[in-house]
Image: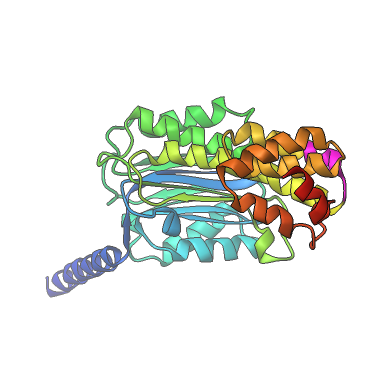
Amino acid sequence: MKLLFCLSLCLIINSLYAQKQAYKDQFAHTFSVVAKDEKTGEMGVAVQSHWFSVGTVVAWAKSGVGAVATQSFVNPSYGANGLKLMEEGLTAEEALGKLVRMDEGEAFRQVAFVDQNGNTAAHTGEKCVESAAHIAHDNFSVQANMMLNDKVVPAMQYAFMKYDDLPLAERLVEVLKAAQKAGGDIRGKQSAALLVVGPEKVEHPWEDKLVDLRVDDHKTPIKELERLLKVKRGYDWMNKGDLAIEDNDIEAALDAYSKAEELLKGNIEVTYWKAISLWNADEKEKAIPILKGIFKKDENWKTLTYRLIDSEIISASEEELDKYF
């Protein structure tokens, strides 16, 4: 009897210790998706929660390795250590299994991994707050806890499979939108994040993240995340335009800036650099009215234009600019 009592007491103490340790971790009840794009090999994670800055703790990914979502009572080590183990050659299932076995607070965790080969693994601890569940398939896993109802996770699964024609980042946003439409977090909305990396390992850390967006505190975080993704796509075209100017490929620059302008309607900077490209392409009759309109709104752009001369970004002299402006 004494032995049984001691064993029971030890189990209770261990359980309380694990619970205490779990509650020390950051509180991030949420819904998320981790996935690999079969066509491009890109991998990513998207998440939304009624908690501040959820993306700083939940979302982890590394090019050529995989992606991780660690949530509920968050143990961030699943992110860093999970990526390390997968980079060393363990599958998503092997890596997650190893970390769960080492975690005394696993009953409070919800975690999902996807590796570079599209293998997935997920864990929903028995102490996760209802409604909590996950669905793991080849190339993607969707998971949620503290949801309004049990329709959220199936809705996420359906959305990921439905939007297979979209780029991975846009596809992950659609999954979040479907989760919210199905009921979402029982507490409401506050923050969201989107992280996408490439299929191959990169030489430099700054090349790792293809998309890295966070909405830390917002009334409609998923809607704002979707807007930011569109802005990011526009600035991707802006960057291509800038690179084309460096290469003196005016035609490519004009094409890139035009595409950016379409995505970033009303953005004065996009219009400005398109006008500079037109000027450099010797289409001054098109560039001049655009630049005049911009200068009328804000003379700082005129000052900038003169400063571009010394950097050889604009093919003009001060006398020539004085003639028109």
Q: Position of residue 273 (x, y in %)?
A: 71, 45
| Residue at screen point 52% across, 42% down | 228
Tell whether 92 sits left or right of 153.
right
Q: Position of residue 307 (x, y in %)?
A: 72, 59
Tell whether 199 sits left or right of 153.
right
Depth order, front residue of 213/44: 213
| Residue at screen point 49% across, 45% down | 46
Image quadrant holding the C terminus, namely: top right
Which image quarter: residue 241?
A: top right
Is residue 149 visible in the rendered structure shown here?
yes
| Residue 10 is a magenta residue | no
Which image quarter: residue 281?
A: top right
Is residue 119 visible in the rendered structure shown here?
no
Image quadrant holding the N terminus, namely: bottom left
> Which span is picked out in magenta?
248-254
Q: Position of residue 233 (x, y in %)?
A: 63, 41
Most common SS among magenta residues: helix
Q: How is the image coloured?
A: rainbow
| Residue at screen point 47% across, 50% down | 214
Total of numbered circles in the picture? 0
Depth order, front residue of 47/129: 47
| Residue 251 is a magenta residue | yes
| Residue at screen point 37% across, 40% down | 133
Depth order, front residue of 169/320: 320
> Is 177 above or below relative to 297?
above
Q: Position of residue 289 (x, y in %)?
A: 71, 34
Tell whether 5 sits left or right of 115.
left
> Is 266 above or below relative to 7?
above
